[in-house]
Amino acid sequence: MAFSSSDWTIDYGAKTVTNDDSGTGTNLPVNLGTTAKVGPTIDFFQWLAGEFAATSQMDDEYPIQSDTPTVYKWLNGWTFGHADDFKYLSGGSMEDPAGSGTATADSLWSNLYSIGSQEEGTQLYMIQDDVEVTPWWISGNIDILVLVKDTGVWIQSDDTAGVAADGALWIYAREFGESYDHNFADISGGSRNPIGINTAADGSNNSGELYLTVADETGFTVGSFVLGGTSGAVGKIAKFDAGNNYIYLNAVRGGPFVISETLTEYSDREAQTATGESTTNDGSTAFTDVVPGWSADFTITFGAISRDLNNGDGLQPYDVEIEGSGRTMAEFYEYLKYITRYGSVTSVNGDDGQEYRSADEGTYSEVKTAPFGTLAGTTFYGARGVWVTDYATADFVLIDADGDQQSPPNYQKVIATHTSLSGTNIFVAEISGGSIIKNQYTISVADGSSITATASVNANKAPQSGVIRVGDTKYSYGSFSGAVFSSVTPDPSGESGDFYVPLLDLLADATSEQSDNIIYSGDFDIRTSVRQYGFKPYDVDTTFSSAGRAFSPILSDDPQAT
């Protein structure tokens, strides 16, 4: 655009040039989109140079110098009149020399522009000196001036080696529901600096952060935006549940949505272009968390640890342990993306989640699309140093802190399911020749919290945690390694003789019960038994196979057991 004196005010006494909207931000892109009075630095130069080329200005000191089409300098003590003035320029840098005739900049506004393609409405954000710069730009690719040196002091950020770098910054794109991206830029040299940022729809991340129950979702489109007429909240549509009239949304700004407000669809994040579709938020709950509601199920702990995946490689080093309370790998993936999305202030390794890049930033190769790891189908591929535990299925591939790939063995489980299962005793154990093997092991030592056998535990026939039977006495154990069962309760001191490890041995309190993981290496025969007074006994011999063993017992009433 061509600037004019109606856009900027020249103060000859103060030697300042001030944008007429400075301080109000009314004509910045974030407010008015493409109608904003923002233009190239070369246009600003041409207007100002033209002003000072007039006859009436010949007795005033010249204010600006052009070194190249993208590099400009203030001269003779002239400068911006307001701290926000640079936000109205694009396409070239501005330098404010420390004094007349010096070559060292006292302040520097470098030009940064992004290249690449992002999903509709993606907001790029900037981290400078470990602090987010409040955006004045609209969504999509940016072309802005950035203050990187202020009155002689560099504004610093971490470089790729984890060391402070003068005039550096990070640009991120992390919209939940999309693949993430980020890049580092050293723009201390001024001029014009490109940075690549690309995102795409993430088919593995579509739950939505929240959902609304609406009068009618017909006509709305995934990827468009919803504005609450009363709340002013904006969300991006992730998916629909037509049967329940749910719209799943990823939060963009504001919130919560409120009951009975009108929801209007817009094609853009800034809610400027309405599509003509609207409905009403009819839900009894105005704002319901989906992925955020999983927070209580996950514990993330950073720090050096050693863990054994039971794949034959023994203990290996990791940097972070993620416990998931039985969640699936798909849920692990979505939750880990949620806490690292744009706007996340969840503490992740001592920093805001929106800044997290890896378990050892500057050393490990970064997984930009999802910093804790990616998901392909149902398989989670962890970033370097990430250890996962307490999951529904061991469907993952990890990379330890040394950079070595670690794949789990074929973990399988015994699972019993029945609508009347609660209250029954469930017992599953290895058999041979039609009899339960009750002398799998012999006790060597039994003390206050452990039992040591005379031979190593067969990990292919023992759950990672479970029950030990010494005769008819039951002890629970938390883990085993070699010949030692640990975290044994109650106190087994004084026990001796033979014992065995059932695959499942418990009193059911739900309609489905399952064992801990068992490493499969080959089929073996088992007996599945379910009993409760009032039911006819269920005892069936079968096989533990490469798919484990899932069964639904026949629980028939016993008319004589009254």
Image (tube, grey):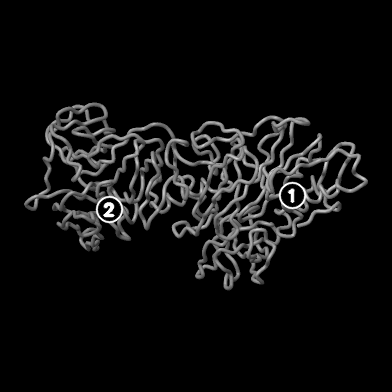
- The location of residue 248, given as percent across then percent down, is 54, 61
**Nearer-the-camera pick, 373 or 531:** 373
Q: Quadrant of residue 447?
A: top left
How crowded pointer 2 is (Cα within 10 Å; few <14, some 14-19, many 20+) is rated as: many
- The location of residue 93, given as percent across then percent down, is 69, 44
Q: What residue type is labelled 1?
A: Tyr
- The location of residue 482, given as percent across then percent down, is 20, 34
Q: What residue type is labelled 2?
A: Thr
Q: What element carries label 2?
A: loop
Q: Earlier in the sequence, mark 2 or mark 1?
A: 1
- The location of residue 217, given as percent across then percent down, is 57, 70
Q: Farthest residue toward the right? A: 56
**Nearer-the-camera pick, 157 or 539:** 157
Q: Which residue, given by chain and number where applicable, does mark 2 sit on?
A: 424
Residue 483, relative to residue 504: is it above or below? above
**Nearer-the-camera pick, 267 or 281:** 267
Q: Quadrant of the N terminus?
A: bottom right
**Separation of residues labelled 2 and 1 (CA atoms):** 72 Å
Q: Is mark 1 on a helix, strand or loop?
A: helix
Residue displayed at 19% across by 40% down = 469
Answer yes or no: do the residues labelled 2 and 1 have beta carbons within 8 Å? no
Kindly report which numbered mark, 2 or 1, lies closer to the viewer in this rendering. Answer: 1
Horizontal side of residue 185 vs 97, given as left or right? left
Mark seen at residue 88: 1
Residue displayed at 44% across by 40% down = 299
Horizontal side of residue 78 vs 457, given as left or right? right
